[in-house]
Image (spheres, helix red, strand yellow):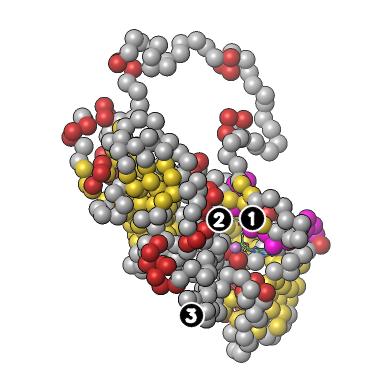
Amino acid sequence: MTKDKLEKVAGNGLISRRHLLGMGAAGIGVAASNSVLGADAGINFEIPSWSRTPGPGASAYGGRSRYTEHLQRTHGAPNPTYPGGGSSRSPLQHLQGTITPNSLHFERHHAGVPDIDPARHNLVINGLVRQPLVFSYEDLLKYQMVSRIHFLECAGNSGALLRGGNENGTAQSLHGLVSCAEWTGIPLSTLLDEAGVLPEARWIAAVGADAASMGRSVPIEKALDDVMVALYQNGEPVMPGQGYPMRLFCPGWEGNISVKWLTQIKLTREATHFRDETSKYTDTQPNRSSYKFTFPMGTKSLITSPSGQMSLDRPGIYQVTGIAWSGSGSIRGVEVSADGGRTWADAAIQGHQLNKALARFTIPWEWNGGNAVLQSRATDSQGNVQPTRDAIIAERGTISFYHNHCIQSWGVGNNGEVTNIYV
Ligand SMILES: Nc1nc2c(c(=O)[nH]1)N[C@H]1C(S)=C(S)[C@@H](COP(=O)(O)O)O[C@H]1N2
Ligand SMILES: [Mo]
């Protein structure tokens, strides 16, 4: 296939996703036949040192290649008035697929990570139940568990975009408070059934064992639907930063409500109005009234490559790729634009389209060396379409920055540099 045979499907160089598997001669690699064999194409016939002597043997717990150590979470400076408080962000621009490795899962802590001895940790279920119950970690391990792949996103993720600026923003710095894992645990409904929920119970109050005693209220319908007490994360016990030995996991809802280091669930008539569901994570409108709660995260997508602070080295074909998710269902499709939203083309979904999980999209794009604006727009299984930044600001104003799921625009300059821009 030659370059002029590539089917263009939208303005400024977007190529049909059908060409994904057969880029052939028009593809990205440097063709060896164009050069004296070996030399220019970088083919090295010398046997490298690592092929000559055996390396170290098996190890007790795996580490990564020293050549990938630049993949790091980033976190803000410690704040002495807020010990242990803060967050770290996943390096989205360096990851592929849809599962976040446990060591790179984003973190948000209100009082640091408690060092919990599972032998001394309990989960209490009390309040409006027939029989209050106490579970040890050992007790919980005996229950039948379920495994589900779900994203987790902090309500504050992408909030900075609404305030403007951030020319140097990256996928990680602007949007890195989202991750996705296979969570394994006990459906909360199983444990609540055992305690016997009284008819007047309309909410649960979930409380963590960290020094913040972080608590959140969850309506009983959600608690009995798909909420779980998660004990495992991608097959191993939940990481300390993610809530070891157990966390509440509320699929699709703002991250704050998935209470880590879970130690108590109290059944109540009303929402408890904990500190973190009143002072934070509430959306204040332009008329200064606030919504009490905003639970599901919006339909959202983000191009992770090319993205902020990357640089395209020469005109040619690039795979545009990114992630999409929705707190209300699965991702039905993702469209990509290279001309700032004037024309759109359907991206291919690489892998699965699971309920309340990250999906990965990709589409080939030929950069002609000129200015371009790359955007992605997700649609979920409920028909919700990701809005523009202007639409979000027109609807909600900018007093509050939570739950921002607007379209991200990456500008590509004629020097190949990619920056966060607003269109
Ligand atoms: N007990 C407790 N639970 C908590 C928090 C906390 O500080 N303490 N942070 C919340 C917030 S704001 C978010 S976004 C998620 C982050 O989960 P993660 O650190 O596993 O990514 O946990 C939530 N659960
Ligand atoms: Mo959060």
- Does dot 2 land on a helix, a strand or a loop? loop
Q: Quadrant of the N terminus?
A: top left
Answer yes or no: disc 1 within 8 Å of ligand 2. Answer: yes
User: Circle 1 sits on which residue?
Assistant: 87
Mark 1 nearby-residue class (10 Å; few <14, some 14–19, many ≥20): many
Answer yes or no: disc 2 within 8 Å of ligand 1. Answer: yes
Residue 403: horizontal and vertical position, in percent? 50, 66
Q: Nearer the viewer, residue 381 or 338?
A: 338
* Above or below 352: residue 379: below
Question: Which residue is at the far left?
Answer: 5
Q: Contact (CB < 8 A) between labels 2 and 3?
A: no
Answer yes or no: disc 3 within 8 Å of ligand 2. Answer: no
Q: Is residue 349 visible?
A: no
Does the segment drawn in magenta span residue 107? yes
> Residue at coordinates 62% horizontally, 51% vertically from top-left?
88
Mark 3 nearby-residue class (10 Å; few <14, some 14–19, many ≥20): few
Q: Quadrant of ligand 2?
A: bottom right
- Does dot 3 land on a helix, a strand or a loop? loop
Amino acid bearing label 2: Leu
Alpha carbon distance from label 1 to label 3: 30 Å
Does the segment drawn in magenta span residue 197? no
User: Circle 3 sits on which residue?
Assistant: 287
Q: Contact (CB < 8 A) between labels 2 and 1?
A: yes
User: Circle 2 sits on which residue?
Assistant: 177
> Residue at coordinates 54% horizontally, 14% vertically from top-left?
48
Amino acid bearing label 3: Asn
Alpha carbon distance from label 2 to label 3: 28 Å
* Above or below 25: residue 90: below
N-term-proximal mark, 1 vs 3: 1
Identify the image quadrant of residue 156.
bottom right
N-term-proximal mark, 2 vs 1: 1
Extent of the magenta region:
102-119
